[in-house]
Image (cartoon, grey):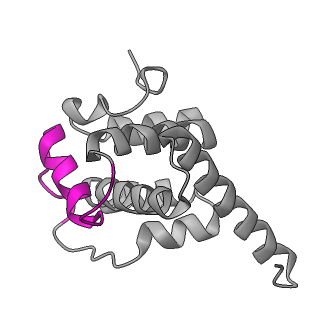
């Protein structure tokens, strides 16, 4: 299915590529699970970053994924006070369906692996540097400085 507009067609293809990559990374056959993991993890990341960093990060995302990132965002009260992996993953769990077949930490690690592969490594490092040390452990080792 095409929209008839090259820019929209391209971004739909990019979003599908991200969903496929997430599904493959997390070993999901159902892309709805990949969507849920991607959405919940990106929302938790968005809410943990200072607003300016969230906006800068979003500029690296394909248009549809950027829309997903900002869906329902309220800028006030950001960044949230999730300093531990448990608190961060609690945010993710709060957005996942009750029957989601994977723990939130595993989902986050898979999504962050895809984000790191898809985006410029230097830009990803800047985002990771904005996070408390414990949360950096959810990112691939290659993505973390030092």
Q: Where is residue 15, by image quadrant?
A: bottom right
Q: Quadrant of residue 138?
A: top left
For the point 52% across and 44% down, the residue is: 115
For this view, does 37 lie left or right of residue 27? left
Q: On screen, 73 above or below 129?
A: below
Rendered position, 113 above or below 140 = below
Quadrant into which the N terminus falls: bottom right
Location of residue 123 in the rendering, given as x and y in whole percent from the top left corner: 53, 40
Vertical relation: 8 (above or below) 80: below
Residue 100 part of the magenta-drawn span: yes
Front residue (pair 53, 111): 111
Residue 122: image location, x then y, percent: 55, 33
Q: Is residue 42 left or right of residue 34?
A: left
Q: Nearer the viewer, residue 40 or 53?
A: 40
What's the residue at 28%, 62% (across, down)?
A: 99
Q: How many numbered marks does the figure carry?
A: 0
Q: Is residue 67 left or right of residue 118?
A: left
Foreground pick, 87 / 93: 93
Above or below residue 21? Residue 59 is below
Residue located 20% across and 63% down the image: 94
Indicate whether residue 34 is drawn in magenta: no
Residue 43 visible to an observer of this rendering: yes
Image: magenta residue range: 78-101
Q: Position of residue 131 (x, y in %)?
A: 27, 40
Residue 79 visible in the snapshot: no
Of the 4 image quadrants, the one containing the C terminus is top left
Q: Residue furthest top?
A: 146
Give the residue displayed 41% in from the left and 24% down from the top.
Answer: 144
């Amino acid at each position: 299915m095409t929209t008839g507009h090259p820019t929209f067609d391209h971004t739909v293809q990019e979003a599908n590529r991200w969903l496929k990559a997430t599904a493959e990374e997390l070993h999901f056959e159902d892309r709805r699970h990949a969507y849920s993991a991607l959405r919940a993890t990106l929302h938790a990341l968005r809410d943990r970053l200072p607003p300016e960093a969230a906006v800068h990060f979003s500029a690296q995302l394909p248009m549809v994924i950027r829309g997903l990132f900002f869906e329902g965002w309220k800028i006030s009260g950001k960044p949230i006070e999730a300093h531990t992996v448990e608190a961060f993953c609690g945010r993710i769990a709060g957005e996942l369906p009750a029957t989601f077949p994977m723990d939130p930490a595993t989902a986050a690690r898979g999504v962050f692996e895809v984000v790191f592969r898809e985006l410029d490594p230097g830009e990803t490092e800047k985002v990771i540097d904005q996070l408390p040390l414990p949360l950096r452990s959810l990112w691939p080792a290659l993505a973390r400085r030092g």
